[in-house]
Amino acid sequence: MSERHLLEVRDLVVRFRTHDGAVHAVNSVSFDLAAGETLGVAGESGCGKSVTNLAIVGLLPKPAGRVEGGSVKLDGRELTTLKEEELRQVRGSEIAMIFQDPMTSLNPVLRIEEQLVETIRAHREVTKEAARARAVELLAAVGVANPESRLRSYPHEFSGGMRQRVMIAMALALEPRVLIADEPTTALDVTIQAQVLDLLRRLTEERGTATILVTHDLGVLAGMADRVNVMYAGTVIESGTTDELFANPRHPYTVGLLRSIPRLDGEAGGKLVPIEGRPPDLVDAPVGCSFAARCAWRTDRCATETPQLLPIDGGTGPIVTSGPEATHVVACFNLVAPDEVADGRPRADRKAGAR
């Protein structure tokens, strides 16, 4: 294993058994994550972002969901083959997860003190008094005023932003090396959202935590992530450093996502540009490129062959999978040309070029 890669995911496959058949939720997803690095994950609802993370921490709903292939290694240790008791020791102490709705994650009938202290003592052999002192320290670290007294509060006595801060404190209680934040600001107003994101950024920098940040908000990723994976229909279809991917998107789907963002420099009253069509049914997954039915750049080849993630420059050398020099890779037969991005459609004189 590379010394730089704290987390390695290789060819991860997740299926859900339903009455209608098997849902192909995640298909051959691979990525690396280094200590102190923030990986952003973007894509429409249902593209496999959250399922990938649930598979990493072993929290897929049973018995319907299961990992059917691939590997997840934390510092060289395979996680997919661990027993539940072993996984419980990994969760919290090695990998922690912040969920998007703290009201469904926090126990509404227990005070915050009980929930934080229980989390700490489940993984550390410390006295109740020491665990309580640690809980006070954590609440103070995430910006909760009067942490001593607020420990005695119930979740409903906190605002939405403060509840999310409590969830962050709980996730950081055991100083995990990997933090997964799944839509951590979804239900928050813009001001509180900025405060929570600033908190996550500061804590990541101070502690050297490797972070996976899942969000629909590409603006958040632009300001928070070092690299971005764009997912569609259970696969990563484009990946690169944040600066490179936002400045030079090459997959038609990524271009569509970026063009659907409201712009401050746009014309007053200008319309947002949606991506036409809808994602495919993952029970009856399409043959070939999963985005072909919605793609203005599609060719006959797209209907029969599945594109692989390859460097945009066609290089054959080693692919750098993390850090500021990460290779920009795209799974597409007909890359969007830089002069086609603004219009969001192929030039009239364009000739489809094979990669």
Image (cartoon, rainbow, N blue to C red):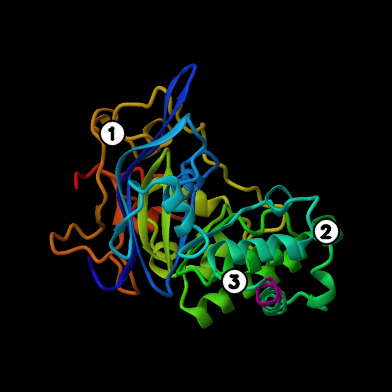
Q: Is residue 250 visible?
A: no
Q: Tell me if 75 is positioned left or right of 134 in this view.
A: left
Q: Amino acid at mark 2?
A: Tyr
The crowd level at tag 2 (other Cα within 10 Å; few <14, some 14-19, many 20+) is some
Q: Is residue 237 magenta?
A: no
Q: For the residues carrying marks 3 and 2, which lies nearer the camera in this image? A: 2
Point out residue 56 in the picture as x, y percentages from the top left corner. 42, 51
Q: Amino acid at mark 3?
A: Leu
Point out residue 166 in the picture as x, y percentages from the top left corner. 71, 65
Point out residue 60 in the picture as x, y percentages from the top left corner. 49, 40
Residue interval drawn in magenta: 128-132
Secondary element under disc 1, as helix, strand or loop, is: helix
Q: Nearer the viewer, residue 93 or 143?
A: 93
Tell me the quarter of the image containing the N terminus.
Answer: bottom left
Dot 1 corresponds to which residue? 302
Secondary element under disc 3, as helix, strand or loop, is: helix
Point out residue 293 in the picture as x, y percentages from the top left corner. 40, 30
Q: Nearer the viewer, residue 146 or 35?
A: 146
**Principal SS element in the magenta part?**
helix
Dot 3 corresponds to which residue? 200
Question: Disc 2 and disc 1: Cα gap in Å?
Answer: 54 Å
Q: For the residues carrying marks 2 and 1, which lies nearer the camera in this image? A: 2
Which residue is outermost to the bottom? Answer: 206
Q: Is residue 45 visible?
A: yes
Residue drawn at (52%, 72%) of the image: 175
Q: Nearer the viewer, residue 291 or 60?
A: 60
Q: Say if 142 sits above or below 71 in the image.
A: below
Residue drawn at (21%, 63%) of the image: 319
